[in-house]
Structures are given as C-alpha cells and as structure tokens.
Image (cartoon, helix red, strand yellow):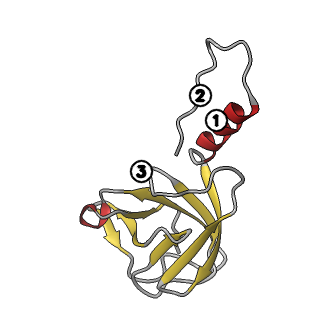
Amino acid sequence: MALPNEFASLTSANTVQLDDNFNACSTQGLITCRASGTSAAISLIQTTVGAQVTAYVNYMVFQFISVNANTGPMTANVSGLGALPIYLDALSGPVTLIGGEIVFGNFIWLAYDSSLNSGLGGFHLVNPYHS
C-alpha cells in the first residue's frame, strides 16, 4: 500500500500523485466485498473502487452480505490472500465461532487483527446477529 503524497510544498499536483493518494486512502475505510462460500468458509472479493487489497493490515474492515449461516467455526479469505478464522468478541476475549453467529442475508463487518490465531491473524466479527 503506497503512502499518500504531501502537497504542502507543491504549487500543483499531477494526476498520478492524486491517483496515488486516492488509492492509499481507499483501503482505510470500509472495504465492500461480494461474498460466496459455505457455512464454514467465506470467500470475499473486493468491489470497492480504488486500490485492491494486496495484504491484510491491522484494522482493515471488510463489509458484505452473508450468503450462508455458519454452523461452527468459520474462515474468511479476502481476494485470495489466505483463509483466516473469524472470532466473536466476548467478555473473556475473542472466541472461536460455534454456530449461528453469522446469519444468511445479514450485513456483516469483519475487522482484521494480526494478533488473533496465535499471531497468525484473523477477523473479529464486528456486528453479530443476536437473537
């Protein structure tokens, strides 16, 4: 991910510099994705205009409409970067999904955290369905 250009000392910016800044900022907000997959594994393809995600970075938030309910632990794989487990935040800390936390048709946010999964990374389920 490119760093933004600083324009304070410039009298004009060229199109490439402006595009670079747009792309650098595009992965700092919610990243909209199209979902597919099963009750155990979600595949997400980025649909947000701007730079495509090429690596997971802490605090990236991916949003999508669920295409399946989970029946147990679940992983998510964004743009083929690698499947990582999804965790539910609890009073005792993040816990593995057990089933029913992700519901078909619900709007979902997953936030990347490199400290999950014994330091291998994973996702926090930001807005779980509660019955």
Q: Give above or below for 101 relative to 24.
A: below
Mark 1 to mark 3 CA distance (whole Å): 20 Å
The residue pinned by badge 3 equals 58
In the image, what residue occupies the spot 52% across and 46% down? 1
Sequence-first tag of 1 and 3: 1
User: Secondary structure beneath disc 3?
Assistant: loop
> Given this view, does label 1 or label 3 mark the residue nearer the observer?
1
The residue pinned by badge 2 equals 5
User: Secondary structure beneath disc 2?
Assistant: loop
Q: Amino acid at mark 2?
A: Asn
Q: Amino acid at mark 1?
A: Asn
27 relative to 34 in the view: left or right: left
Mark 1 to mark 2 CA distance (whole Å): 6 Å
User: Secondary structure beneath disc 1?
Assistant: helix
Residue 116 image position (x, y, % from top left): 31, 62
How many neighbours does mark 3 have within 10 angstroms: few (below 14), some (14-19), or many (20 or more)? some
